[in-house]
Amino acid sequence: MSATRDKFGRPIVVVTGMGVVTSLGAGKADNWAKLCAGESGIRTIKRFPTDGLKTTMAGAIDFVPVEPFSSTDLSERLADLATEEAIAQSAIGSKGDFPGPLFLAVAPVEVEWPQRQELGRAIGNQTEINYDEMLRVSGGGKFAPYHRRFLFGSVADHLAETFGTKGSPISLSTACASGATAIQLGVEAIRRGEADAALCVATDGSVNPEALIRFSLLSALSTQNDPPHSAVKPFAKNRDGFVMAEGAGALVLESLESATARGARILGVLAGCGELADSFHRTRSSPDGKPIIGCVRNALSDAGIVADQIDYINAHGTGTPENDKMEYLGISTVFGERAREVPVSSNKSMVGHTLSAAGAVEAVFSLLTLEHQRIPPTINYDVPDPAIPFDVVPNTARDARVTTVMSNSFGFGGQNASLILTGEPI
Amino acid sequence: MSESKTSNDAAEAWITGIGLATSLSDNLDANWEGLEQRRINVDEKSFAPYIVHPLAPVSFDAQIPKKGDQRQMEAWQRIGTYAAGLALDSAGIKGNKDILARMDMIVAAGGGERDLAVDSAILNAEAQGNSAPGFLNERLMSDLRPTLFLAQLSNLLAGNIAIVHGVTGSSRTFMGEEAAGVDAARIALARIAAGQSDIALIGAAHNGERKDLLVLYEFGDFNLKGKFAPVWARGEHGGFALGSGGAFLVIESRKHAEARGAKPYARLTNVVADQARRKQAGDVTASLETLWSKLGKLDANGAIITGATGAEPATSEERAFLAKHPDFAVRATGTTFGHTMETQFPLGLALAALSISRGKLFAPNDSSGVEIEMAKPPSQIVVIGAGHWRGEGMALVEAIR
C-alpha cells in the first residue's frame, strides 16, 4: 500500500484550506473562540418586519452588508468570504486560478419579493396586477440583471469566474444535507483521479420573510423567541424546532499526494462519505430509522472503520422534536451501548441551522475540533430528554482526545449524508 | 473542462431505460412517430405573445398511483416523477426493491413554482396602499398552502421519485439550468466508469407552461414571441419557446446490465462539459470545438442531436460550430419539443439512444439547410447541450456492437 492511498487503494483526500462565516462571525478564529465559549449567534430579526410571525429570531448575518438585499446576493457574498479564507490558507494555485472543479451547495434560487414588488411598481396602481402585466413590463433590458441573478447557476457562475475553478461548476441541493454532498462530490472526483484538488463550498443566506414563513407553515421552527439566544435546544426535552440561520463553509480538498508534493499543511482527512435516501415521507424520517442507520454505516464502511473508532459525533442536531429523536435512534442502533458514552454535540445550538451550508460549516467545525482537541458544547441544554441519553457535551466545551469525527446531515426529501473526518490518514 | 470518459480499464456504461413525457407523448413509439412525421405541438395562444410547447395529455395515475402523492407535487414534479417511472419500467426494474434500494439518482432540477394568485393579490393590495409593516407576512402566513414549499424545493423531485418509486441508493439534485442536465449525466457516468456506482437513474423535468418562469427569461429577452418558427429559422432576434417535458434514463455498467439480462438501447461512451465565460463573440463556438475534440474517435458522416435553444447569440455560435462539421446530420430537439431547460440534455441523450436502438436517425424538420437527411443507421450520435446563458456540454452515444 502506497502511503498516499487508503486501504481500498483510492487516493487519500485531505483538507488544506477552510473558511467559515456564521452568525457568530467571519473566519475560523472568531467562530472557534465563540463556539468554545458557548456563545449564540441567534438574535431577534432586524432585517425585515416580523409583525404577525410566530418566529421572530434567526441566525441572520447582518455584518455582511448587501444592498439592496436578496438572499441570493447574500449567499454569494458569504460564499466569497468563506472561499477567500479557505484558498488563502491552502495557498493553492494562484489568484483567480484554482486548479480544480467547484462543487457548490446553494439554496434553490428564485426571484424574491423586492424584485416582484419592483415589477408591481413598474405596472403602477392604475392597472390590475397579474402575471400577464408583470410579463409586459419585464422585457426590454431594464431588468436584465435579474435574469443573471436569479438563474439557479448564478452563484456558482460567479464563484467559478472569481476563483478560476476548472470545468463545469456544479450547483447542488440535497436540502439540509447539501454541504455534505458538496464535499462528497469533491472526494469522489479526487478518488477517481479526475482532479488533484476540488473546491467545495456551501452557502445559505435565506433569512427572508417568505423562506421563514415556509418553514413556519411546516411547523419546523422554534417559537421560543425570548430570549433568542436560548431558542435552539438540541436533544433537550423542551426543544421545539430549529432556528433558521445563515452561513457559509468552504473547503479546499486535495489528494494527499498532491498536497504533500507542494508542501501544503494538512488540516485533516476526508476519510469517508455515506449517503442513503429515505422514501418514507417528504419531511419525516422513516420511523424505523433504517435510512439514517444505513447512511451512518455507509460512511463507516466507506472510511473502512467501525463505530468504535469514532470518538466524537458532530450531530445534525437541529433541535426539532423529530430530528433529534431519529438521530438518537440511528446512532444508538449503530453504536449500541457506546451511544451513551461517545460525545455528541450540536453546533446548531449556537449558530442555528445554516440549511444548505450546514454540512460544510459543520465539517469545518469538526476539523477544528480535531485540530484543537476540544469539543464545542451543545448549549441551552438544561432539561435533558430521558429518551435521548447522549453525552451532548452540555453547555460547556470540553478538552478531549479526538482522532475520528462523524458529522451527520439530514434533510427534507429523505436526504441523509454522513462524513468521517480524521486528523491523520487511516 | 470536465470529462467523464470510459477509458479502457473503466467500466462500460449502457443506457438500459428511457422514460419520456413530452409535448408529443408519454410513449416512446409515439414520440418516435411524431418526430418521423415532423409533428409539433405548439401553443401560440394561451401565453400569447409567448409560445410554449405544452405537455401532451398524460394519465399521471399510471406512474403515480396515489392521488395524495400527486397533490403534494406541482406540475414539474409530477412530470418528472412520471417520466422517472417510465424509465424504470423501460429498464425492467420497476418495483425491483433489491436494485432500487442501491440505485443512485441524480436529478437536474429547477423548482420554485409560484402560486400566481397569491403573488398577484399581494402586489395589488400593496399597489392600493397597503404597505403596513408586516402586511406581507400576514398575507403569506394566511395565503400560502403549507405544503407548497415542498412542491417548490428543487430536491423534492428526487424526493418524490424516492417516495413513489423507491429509488433510494442515493439522491442528489443538481441545479443550474441546462448545465445541470449535462452534469447529472457526466457525474453518473464517471461514477459508473470508476466503479463508484453500478446503476443510476438520471434525468430532469420542466414545466414550461409557467408565467413565473416566462418572467425570469423575459428579464433577459430570451422568450420567443409572436409566431412559431423552427429553431434554425428564428433569426438574430430569436428566442426559445419553453417546453414542458420530463426525460429520465437508466444508466448502468455493462457488467450489471448483463448480469440481470437487461437489453441496452445504446452505450453512453463519454460526457464532457465546460463553462465558457462568453465575454467575446465566438466563445461558445470555441468551447464546443474543444469539447468535440475530447469526445473520442468520431466516424465521418455521423449524427448530432442538439438542444440548441433558438436564443441568441448562443444558437448562432453553435451554428457556426456545426458549419465546421457539415458531414454530420443535425437534429434540433428545440423545434419539436421546445426548450426544456434542465431537461434539454437528458432529452437529447434519450433521443440519441432511441435512434441508435432503432437503427435510424429521425427525420429532419428544418428548411434552413442545417438539418439534412441521413440514410444509414447511425452508429454514433453526438448530443450537444449549450445553455442559453451559460454552460456547454456534449456526449457520445454509440451502438453496442
Image (tube, coloured by chain):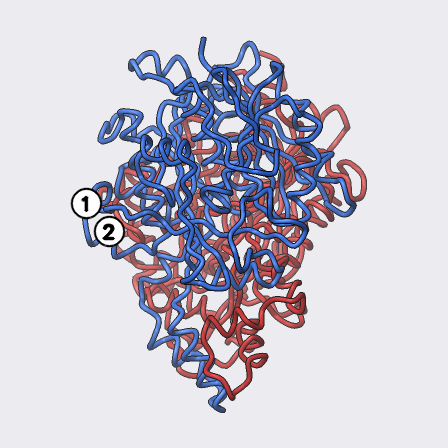
Chain colours: A red, B blue
2 vs 1, front mark: 1
Mark carried by residue A314:
none
Residue that appears at 59% across and 66% down: A61
Residue that appears at 53% across and 42% down: B180
Residue B294 visible? The answer is yes
Q: On screen, B45 above or below B90?
A: below
Give the secondary structure at mark 1: loop
Quarter of the image that includes the N terminus of chain A: top right
- Comparing B318 with A277, the one in front is B318
Mark carried by residue B65:
1
Q: Position of residue A374 (x, y in %)?
A: 55, 47
Residue under numbered circle 2: B69
Whether residues under marks 2 and 1 lie with C-beta atoms below 8 angstroms apart, the answer is: yes
Q: Position of residue A331 (x, y in %)?
A: 33, 41
Residue type at numbered disc 2: Asp
Residue that appears at 26% across and 24% down: B92
Identity of the residue furthest to the left in this view: B66
Residue type at numbered disc 1: Pro
